[in-house]
Amino acid sequence: MATAVLSSSQTRRDVVYPHAQWYFLLAIVLTWVGFARSYFAVISTQTLPHHIHGALMGGWIALLIVQPILYQRGQLKLHRTLGRWGAFVLVPAIVVVGLLMIRSMFRGTEIPPFIVDQLAFLDVNALIDIPLFVGMAIYTGHDVQRHARWISSTVLTLMPPALVRAMPILPIFRQSFRANVNIAMGLMCFLFALLIFDDWRKAKRVYPPYPIALACTAFAALGANYASHWSWWHALTLLLGRS
């Protein structure tokens, strides 16, 4: 793998996803659409943790828009420096603030308990999966194929909350919030499966990141529907701040 710094008119030949930044930009747009009414339209009434949570999530995706561009242009030192800041500062902050948001959700009264359990189960799994995927991306940093796929998996893991909130734009999705959550998670599973198929189609092999991410997402999606019936989950959520 070449490590020389390239000029702005050159790009590396070992880029896994040459257009990754555009897909990640689409994720930013979807996030804005999804939270346009529930957050941006009432931003002045939101609490500080909500602002920090939104900034951290948006910051992670924004970082992932920049990172492929830097890599493609051969600016590897800056790419690695920003990656370290993201992994060791941004991701831990996302986990801590995410746990605070779960605590706040459990102590709220406006959401039915079974919906709270469903959402909290998904959130807890996401707060486990994201550090796991980022940690594996660091561990496989010498292998661009695995590294890129682990990082890409974090974006799909973050997308369901925004997607669920964007879905009611279409009348067909205005009937059941819980059904929309399941549809969004099912779509993420489908996208991971599609990425696995794409790897097989192009290289006749399957890299570990997407199958593992698919298994994690499927577990979260299925388990979220039954979490309210599990005693171990209720015990865990007491530690998370359930009253």
Image (tube, helix red, strand yellow):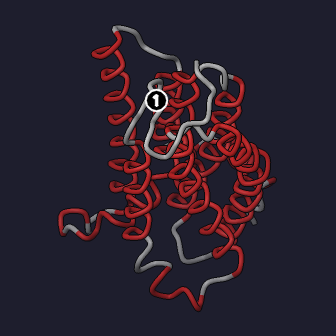
Q: Residues within 10 Å of mark 1 (few under 14, many from 20)?
A: some
Residue shown at 60%/45% (left/top)?
126
Considering the image in quadrants, where does the N terminus appear? top right
Horizontal relation, residue 73 to residue 170: left or right: right
Residue 62 locus on image (x, y percent):
55, 58
Q: How many marks?
A: 1
Q: Amino acid at mark 1?
A: Val
Residue shown at 59%/60% (left/top)?
57
Among the 4 quarters of the image, the one containing residue 30: bottom left
Residue 34 locus on image (x, y percent):
39, 68
Among the 4 quarters of the image, the one containing residue 33: bottom left
Q: 147 or 170, which lies in front?
A: 147
Q: 181 or 71, which lies in front?
A: 71
Horizontal relation, residue 97 to residue 73: left or right: right
Residue shown at 44%/25% (left/top)?
13
**Does residue 16 appear anywhere in the picture?**
yes
Q: 111 or 99, which lies in front?
A: 99
Q: Is residue 4 above or below residue 182?
A: above
Q: Which residue is mark 1?
A: 15
Residue 215 locus on image (x, y percent):
49, 27
Q: Is residue 137 above or below residue 101?
A: above
Q: Is residue 124 above or below residue 199?
A: below
Q: 130 or 84, which lies in front?
A: 84
Considering the image in quadrants, where does the C terminus appear? bottom right
Kind of element beneath mark 1: loop
Residue located farthest toward the top when viewing the structure as drawn: 204
Residue 85 locus on image (x, y percent):
75, 50
**Does residue 223 appear anywhere in the picture?**
no
Residue shown at 54%/77% (left/top)?
110
Q: Is residue 163 above or below residue 143?
A: below
